[in-house]
Image (spheres, helix red, strand yellow):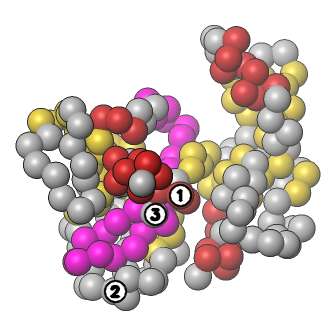
Amino acid sequence: MLAFTKKIIIALFILALFGAPAQAEEFHPVVAEYVSHEMIPCEHSDELIYCINDIYHYRYRIVESHSPMLAAGDVISALFTSSHHYPAFMEERFTYFLLMRHNDQWVIDDFLWSFIYRTSDNQFAECGCSLLEGRVDDPPQDLCQLATFQPRIQIDITHASAYGRAKYEENPAWAVNGNTALCTRGIYTKDLPKLFL
């Protein structure tokens, strides 16, 4: 029961701004960038959002789509409960969403929510292999391997806290040299849909 309650609390809800209805079991992978957000009162609950305190209305712009129903440039709106503790978005960070249709609305499968980075050669990638964990019994070696990124993703951790720095130093996907974290293992987002579609 606790797990079910937690699932309701962190459920993510997206309003349909475009497109025609699709089968509920169809997945629609997209990479989206943060546009803006605002806090609004949580005045009611439904089967997708369980109100505790306030909720946040976020807007995202799709920058990479692997769905015939969604296109780069489309803007989607999302309501997040305050209990989910979403982190601040940095300009170089994007988000990999796996969308589904539910009663004519777009719904995020939050178990595939992940930070995505724009590489210096203008592609999109996740550093690490978390999107494969528990979903692919024997993932193809070429999807997540050393030196996937050329040129590789680099993050300045000059002002990172001890906890923030440890996240990079203890993660095998990153190699830390001084105040720079270098991504050496990861997955291009263009390679992910084949695993879930």
Amino acid type, mark 3: Asp
Which residue bears the numbered disc 2? 22
- Can see residue 89? yes
Cβ–Cβ under 8 Å for marks 3 and 1: yes
Residue 52 is situated, as x and y percent measured from the top left of the image, at 23, 37
> Marks 3/1: CA distance?
6 Å
Residue 149 is situated, as x and y percent measured from the top left of the image, at 80, 51
The mark nearer the N terminus, 3 or 2, is 2
Mark 3, other Cα within 10 Å: few <14 / some 14–19 / many ≥20: some
Q: Nearer the viewer, mark 3 or mark 2?
A: 3
Amino acid type, mark 2: Ala
The mark nearer the N terminus, 2 or 1, is 2
Q: In front here: 191 or 132?
A: 132
Residue 111 circle label: 1
Amino acid type, mark 1: Phe
Mark 2, other Cα within 10 Å: few <14 / some 14–19 / many ≥20: some
Q: Quadrant of the C terminus?
A: bottom right
Seen at 73% across and 59% down, the residue is 133
Residue 109 circle label: 3
